[in-house]
Amino acid sequence: MTASSASPIGVFDSGVGGLSVLREIRRELPHESVLYVADSGYAPYGDRPAAFIQERSLAVTQALIERGAKAIVVACNTATGAAVEVLRQAFSLPIVAIEPAVKPAAAATRSGVVGVMATSVTLSSTNLLRLVGQYPAPGGTAMQACPGLVEQVEQGDVSSPATRALVEQYVRPLVDKGADTIVLGCTHYAFLEPVIQAVAGPAVTVIDPAPAVARELRRRLTGASLLASEDAVASERYLTTGDTAQAARVMSQLLGRDVPVARV
């Protein structure tokens, strides 16, 4: 199937976190149709071996292309770190990947210290280490692994006392080290941003890289003459490799509207 400007954009994540990227794509590109895959049957990716993440990323990308995707958005920092180069070698269509916003954070910090919240796989990825080396914060970059946060979002639990306690456990050490800028290094964490901001305090800037991904997607689609026309009627399809009822409940909650979900 040959992709055209009317074809959909394929977006995938290990679960529902990538909806934070999809949300920004809808704002930036309201005429684009979107296919979203939550690989929830194999989630979370956060502590999995790189080979496993590459295998899943290849399989999901292939499934999106078979459904007509004209471009792929890797809406998962863990998959970006482990698999984006493999995807770009395997497929010729535009592939836009999210990555922690280390560069803007290093430019924005006033205290000189930047904090990064991410999964353990992302924190150890060569991609993140390269970014930190390329854009060093003057006072250092404090890395914080956040086990359990992805699972809270996957359950749709973004504001309970248990979730807040976990957020405090991970945010407090960053603030104590002097971080005045915190990078969200996992797309799931965007749904926890109000809690993260409340715990960090008003003097701390929280940076979500999703808007930058949507802008880069616009640039890539324009360059490839694949941007949807302004009279196009956008559609959305949501798919999961996991439980469809669970996915529909959580996706509807996170997006604030009813989302029907089919199984891949």
Image (cartoon, helix red, strand yellow):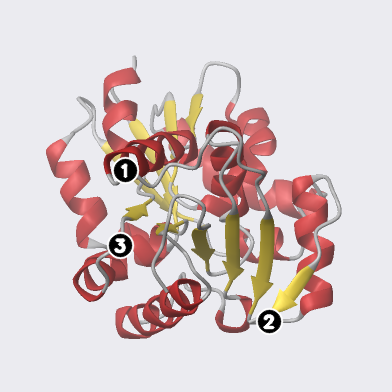
Question: Residue at label 2?
Answer: 242
Q: Is residue 168 visible?
A: no
The amino acid on which the numbered mark 1 sits, given as a three-letter code, is Arg
Point out residue 231 in the picture as x, y percentages from the top left corner: 61, 35
- Of the numbered discs in the image, which one, if any, rests on residue 60? none
* Nearer-N-terminus badge (3/2): 3
For label 1, count other residues whose C-alpha is less than 10 Å away and answer few (under 14), some (14-19) or many (20+). Answer: some
Point out residue 171 in the picture as x, y percentages from the top left corner: 54, 41
Q: Give the side of residue 110 with respect to residue 38, left or right.
A: left
Residue depicted at 33% across the width and 43% down the height: 225
Q: Quadrant of residue 242?
A: bottom right
Could you say whether the residue bearing mark 1 is in a helix, strand or loop?
helix
Residue depicted at 31% across the width and 56% down the height: 94
Work out which residue is located at the far left of the displayed protein and give it: 134
Question: Residue at label 1?
Answer: 220
Quarter containing the C terminus:
bottom right
Q: CA distance from mark 3 to mark 1?
A: 10 Å
Point out residue 98 in the picture as x, y percentages from the top left corner: 39, 50
For label 3, count other residues whose C-alpha is less than 10 Å away and answer few (under 14), some (14-19) or many (20+). Answer: some
* Nearer-N-terminus badge (2/1): 1
Could you say whether the residue bearing mark 3 is in a helix, strand or loop?
loop
Q: Is residue 8 visible?
A: yes
* Nearer-N-terminus badge (3/1): 3
